[in-house]
Image: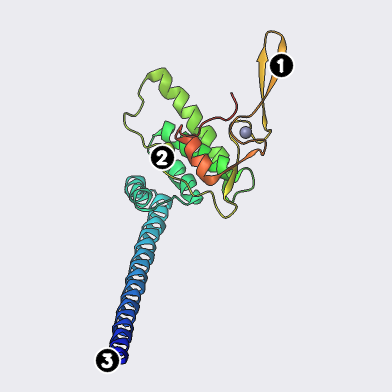
Amino acid sequence: MIKALKNYGLWILLILSHFTWAQEGEKEKLKLIELQAEVSHNTAVMHQLDSAIYLSENERYVEADERFIYVMRNLRSIPSDLTFYFGKNSFYLKKYRQSIDWLNKYIQLKGTTGQYSEQAVEWLRKSEVELLKERVTESAQAKEILSRDFTIDCGPAGKVVCPVCMGKTVIIKKNYFGESYKTCPYCSKHGYLSCTDYNKLVKGELKPSGD
Ligand SMILES: [Zn+2]
């Protein structure tokens, strides 16, 4: 009798373990399906980015703008090259503040060595000149889309030169008595920010350390 019970227990155990094993398999399958869906979603969005760039290069700036914004809203983090393309396209739409904002973003992310760094500086200057003219005539655009509302992908290095101290780790303040030096409160003496901290800083969410 006792032996029979033991066997019975063993069977239950076997059935139970088989059942949970099957469940695990289902979970794995679901995960795989989710992953595949994400990959195909991203591929579709990247196609939209290609066509936005194509439209922009063919002087169809309004259509390009719509697609750029679609891509920005549908990716978890924005590829750094997009900041250049969108900034340049914004110039043609006479959205100069927006153009300056995104081109500055590109320069912050890539420094002087990026594929589009030279062009970015050029377009940035053009936008600044136009913005100045606009201020004189007070004909500014009402609604512009700014980069701080998005999460930016900082590229494979995953870090950015600290824009507060420009990587110098100290902030120099000129005052009546000369110059005063203060340790940069954002990059903890590294001169760099992680991509997460950089995005926080831009959104005003990174708390300074020390004082
Ligand atoms: Zn710093």
Which label sits on residue 90?
A: 2
Horizontal and vertical percent position of residue 13 = 32, 82
Q: Relative to residue 124, is residue 26 drawn left or right? A: left
Q: Earlier in the sequence, mark 3 or mark 1?
A: 3
Quarter occupied by residue 46: bottom left
Tell whether label 1 touches label 2 (CB within 8 Å): no
Element carrying mark 2: helix
Picture mark count: 3
Element carrying mark 1: strand
Residue type, label 1: Glu
Q: How many residues crowd around disc 2 within 10 Å: few (fewer than 14), some, or many (20 or more)?
A: many
Q: Is residue 110 above or below residue 189?
A: below
Residue type, label 3: Met
In this rendering, the label closer to the viewer, 3 or 2: 3
Q: Residue at x 59, y 46 (%)?
A: 159
Q: Residue at x 34, y 80 (%)?
A: 17
Q: Which residue is mark 1?
A: 179
Q: Earlier in the sequence, mark 3 or mark 2?
A: 3
Q: Quadrant of the N terminus?
A: bottom left
Tell whether label 2 touches label 3 (CB within 8 Å): no
Q: Which residue is mark 3?
A: 1
